[in-house]
Amino acid sequence: MSALLSTVSLLLCLQGVPALDLFRVTRTPADAPIIPRVHCWCNSYPDTTLCSWPETSHEPHTHYITTYRERHGHPMTNNCLVIPPTPRSPSSGSSSSSDQEWLCQLSDLKLFTDYIINVTAVSPAGSSSFLSGLMMEDIVKPDPPVDVRVSLQNKRHLLVEWSPPSSWRDLEIFPLKYHIRYQWENRGSPKSVNLGPFESTSVELKGLSPGRQYQLQVCSRELMGLGSCSDWSSPVYITVPRTNL
Ligand SMILES: *[C@@H]1O[C@H](CO)[C@@H](O)[C@H](O)[C@H]1NC(C)=O
């Protein structure tokens, strides 16, 4: 058994998993559930940290025990409330077939504190744990801005406006900043320009080419630069009119 454990650890090291991540397989790999592929992020600093992992459809009798505790100091273990994926109704014909995710929310995390999260998949055949260190400040990632609008100001200027993600709770104490990406095609080759950061929720774009179609997206990031920018918002398109002067 210990030979198996060290083999697993060695393989994981070779694959470049951060040193902080520890894994343990408690049954033979053929029987035990697969180790959950857990991804954690903080979408509202410092309130809400979420962890998710994909549903494994071939292991229907698997349930999950999710706990977290401080890495140093306080030995108390907290339970993370696990929310199962919403069952897909067969009639809906939804195209997002691959996105069945388990979710759990960690509450009351302390600032600048190392935690260890343990997501254990349990099935009749055995259990497998995913263990990882996490610190909220490293994994801040807001949701994308919403309600992105673009309008023509005069013949050559565009006004881009958006709203902050509603999941980010405290814009007063922890403001967001934003980046804009606009893209177009020039004789078949894609061009892309990133602008920002902006602390406002609107920006005027100038110097655009008449007759050209632009695709605009916005992402949001914690003002001090913690973590990373959100995913890009869904694209909005506009064509700058040709001037007939
Ligand atoms: C992870 O959680 C499982 C289930 O609660 C537990 O059996 C296991 O000992 C935990 N692992 C560690 C390293 O704390």
Image (spheres, helix red, strand yellow):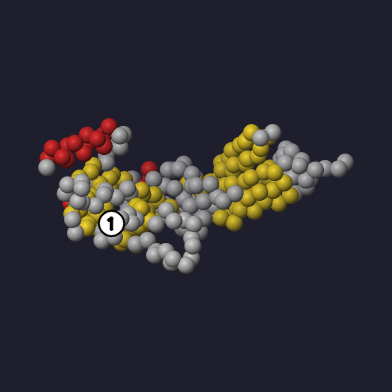
Q: Nearer the viewer, residue 89 or 7?
A: 89
**Quadrant the N terminus occupies:** top left
Q: Amino acid at mark 1?
A: Glu
Q: What residue is rendered at 49% in x and 62% in y?
A: 93
Q: x and y percent of residue 158 in the render?
A: 71, 46
Q: What residue is rendered at 38% in x and 43% in y?
A: 138
Horizontal side of residue 243 vs 105, given as left or right:
right
Q: Quadrant of residue 163?
A: bottom right
Q: x and y percent of residue 177 in the render?
A: 53, 46
Which residue is outermost to the right?
245
Does any portion of residue 70 appear in the rendered image? no
Q: Nearer the viewer, residue 177 or 5?
A: 5
Which residue bears the numbered disc 1? 59
**Quadrant the C terminus occupies:** top right
Q: x and y percent of residue 60 in the render?
A: 29, 60
Horizontal side of residue 59 vs 185, given as left or right:
left
Q: Quadrant of residue 114?
A: top left
Q: Nearer the viewer, residue 193 or 45?
A: 193
Relative to residue 228, is residue 126 depicted above or below?
Answer: below
